[in-house]
Image: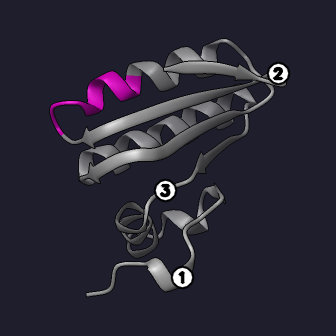
């Protein structure tokens, strides 16, 4: 779902993002960037699971957005998704808007 917010695009993602659903996410990110918004924010609040194919889509989308001059951020990842982003080094690449409280982060 793509929403417009103050000239920026918010892409709300839900459910599992894996090898089966990653291509749809890739298409949505490209469409959002091609609209040349002031910024693209991918809202991960409703994502219950992400795998390496989802990470690949986020990285390729980030590079595509950079090439188009459109800033991109990730928003509201849940504790499990945030852990994946952190362990994969994605938190060093993306701006993370409203990350989870460290006390709620899943350990292990």
Mark 2 residue crowding within 10 angstroms, few (<14) / some (14–19) / many (20+): few
Residue 32 in the figure: left or right of residue 17: right
As measured in the structure, the alpha-carbon distance from the residue carrying label 1 to the one carrying label 2 is 31 Å
Q: Position of residue 46 (x, y in %)?
A: 40, 43
Indicate the secondary structure of the residue bearing disc 3: loop
- Judge whether 46 appears above or below 52 on screen: above
Q: Position of residue 98 (x, y in %)?
A: 65, 59
- Look at the numbered discs 1 and 2 and tell me whether their residues touch, using CB distance below 8 Å: no
The answer to which image quadrant residue 64 occupies is top right
Q: Which residues are magenta?
A: 19-26
The answer to which image quadrant residue 7 occupies is top right
Q: Which mark, residue 13? A: none
Residue at coordinates 54% horizontally, 29% vertically from top-left? 11
Q: Which residue is mark 2?
A: 7
- Look at the numbered discs 3 and 2 and tell me whether their residues touch, using CB distance below 8 Å: no
- Look at the numbered discs 3 and 1 and tell me whether their residues touch, using CB distance below 8 Å: no
Front tag of 1 and 2? 1
Residue at coordinates 56% horizontally, 19% vertically from top-left? 2
- Judge whether 90 appears above or below 38 on screen: below
Q: Which residue is mark 3?
A: 77
Q: Which residue is mark 1?
A: 102
Residue nearest the viewer, comparing 103 with 28: 103
């Amino acid at each position: 779902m793509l929403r417009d917010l103050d000239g920026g695009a918010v892409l709300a993602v839900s459910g599992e993002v894996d090898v089966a659903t990653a291509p749809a996410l890739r298409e949505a990110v490209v469409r959002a960037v091609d609209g040349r918004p002031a910024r693209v924010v991918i809202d991960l609040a409703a994502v219950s699971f992400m795998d390496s194919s989802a990470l690949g889509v986020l990285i390729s989308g980030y590079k595509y957005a950079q090439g188009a001059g459109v800033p991109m951020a990730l928003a509201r990842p849940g504790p499990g998704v945030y852990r994946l982003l952190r362990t994969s080094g994605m938190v060093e690449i993306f701006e993370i808007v409203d990350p989870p409280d460290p006390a709620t982060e899943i350990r292990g």
